[in-house]
Amino acid sequence: MRESDADEPVAPPKLARKRTVTDKMLACTGLVLAGASAFFPWYVFLNPDKFGIHVAEGDRTRDLPDWPGREVVSVSPLAMINKNPGEPKDLIPDPLTTATVSNTGREDDKGPPADQQPFPGKSGFHLLHVVNGRALIEDDTGMYVVKVGSVLPDNSRLASIEQRGEKWVIVTSAGDVYGNN
């Protein structure tokens, strides 16, 4: 099929579009920005005194600066003088406001030692290992190192660590005996 075979002739599409004032302003703005971008680096290159890092004069020598020194002002209580010459020095109250601080919050912020912390609820536990008077026990919440007098997961205390034959056992204050398996 050819174009000449069509029943009705079709007009070609209009490609020409009229430029509006907005299009012209955008084009001019783009050209001005392009010109400024091309010119500005040359302006900076030709005027290095107006741009860049300025080094202070005193940094180029080891000599001390020649400006006057500052007056020394001390705020130490020992440096304060008595402004009333008639009063003896030992009767002058301390001119600084002082206060006492309570011991609240001075306890160890890490909490009590590990062997005195309570276990999280009652649970069964078993002995894993004994060395140097300490026992490693395990329950469903974790493993703990305990010594004689420590609180155990069943809220009793460790009464003794004994070696019975080849095995080590721990005896609680409740009379329970736990051995390593």
Image (cartoon, rainbow, N blue to C red):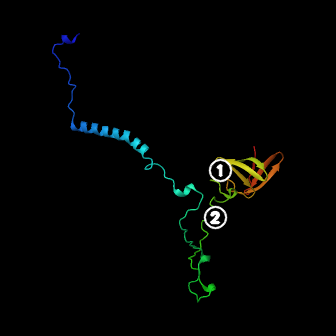
What amino acid is found at the position of numbered circle 1 in the picture? Ser
Residue beneath the point at 58% across and 62% down: 64
Residue drawn 64% across and 62% down? 108
Q: Please state which of residues 43 and 31 is positioned toward the viewer in this rendering.
A: 43
Q: Residue furthest right?
A: 165
Pick out the residue farthest to the bottom. Answer: 86
Q: Which amino acid does label 2 sit on?
A: Glu
Percent position of residue 31, x then y: 31, 37
Above or below, comparing residue 87 to residue 114 in the picture? below
| Left or right side of 165 for 112 | left
Residue picked out by circle 1: 123
Label 2 environment density (alpha carbons within 10 Å; few <14, some 14–19, many ≥20): few
Q: Quadrant of the C terminus?
A: top right
Q: On screen, 156 above or below 89? A: above
At a point 21% along the width and 12% down the height, the residue shown is: 3
In the image, 127: left or right of 72? Answer: right
Task: Say which mark, if any, is on residue 103.
Answer: none
Q: Distance between the residues labelled 2 and 1?
A: 30 Å
Q: At x 72% / y 53%, what residue is drawn?
A: 146
Total number of numbered discs in the rendering: 2
- Provide residue 90's location: percent of width, then percent of height: 63, 85
